[in-house]
Image (spheres, grey):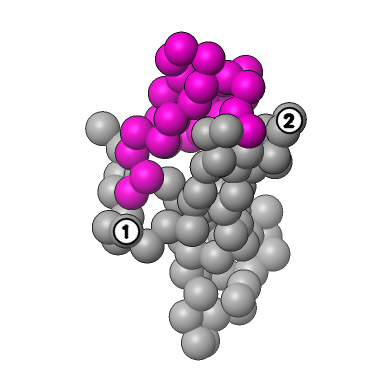
Amino acid sequence: MFMKYLSNVTTLKMDREKCIGCGMCKIVCPHAVYFVAEGKATIIDKDACMECGACARNCPVDAISVNSGVGCATGLIYGMIGSGGTCCGGKDCSCS
């Protein structure tokens, strides 16, 4: 089971009309947000999205959008690479 974040706050959006069903979103998503069936990807657990942006960056047809660079994913990533504290965008945060 993956960590859940706040309900209904993620910026993740998908245009299923553009989706070609390649499955890259499912492959790169660290939190199993996607399922691919019948030639299309579907967001199955939007609240598990940590807004890392991996899905959007790897979608060959730009069917996915997410405002990466916000939220806890950014704080964790910046913390791991040494570019600031492990914050989540607070006013006293070195990575916001």
Question: How many residues crowd around disc 1 within 10 Å: few (fewer than 14), some, or many (20 or more)?
Answer: few
Coordinates of residue 49 in the picture (x, y in percent): 42, 46
Kind of residue at badge 1: Asn
Report the residue marked by disc 2.
60
Q: Is residue 60 above or below residue 52?
A: above
- Give the magenta part as a residue range: 18-47
Q: Is residue 52 above or below residue 42?
A: below
Q: Residue at x 52, y 42 (%)?
A: 14
Kind of residue at badge 2: Pro
Q: Quadrant of the N terminus?
A: top left
Coordinates of residue 88 in the picture (x, y in percent): 47, 69
Examine the structure image and report whether residue 45 is included in the region drawn in magenta.
yes
Report the residue marked by disc 1.
8
Q: Quadrant of residue 22?
A: top right
Is label 2 in a helix, a strand or a loop?
A: loop
Tell me, for residue 65, which label it has, or none: none
Q: Quadrant of residue 24?
A: top right
Q: Quadrant of the C terminus?
A: bottom right
Q: Quadrant of residue 77?
A: bottom right
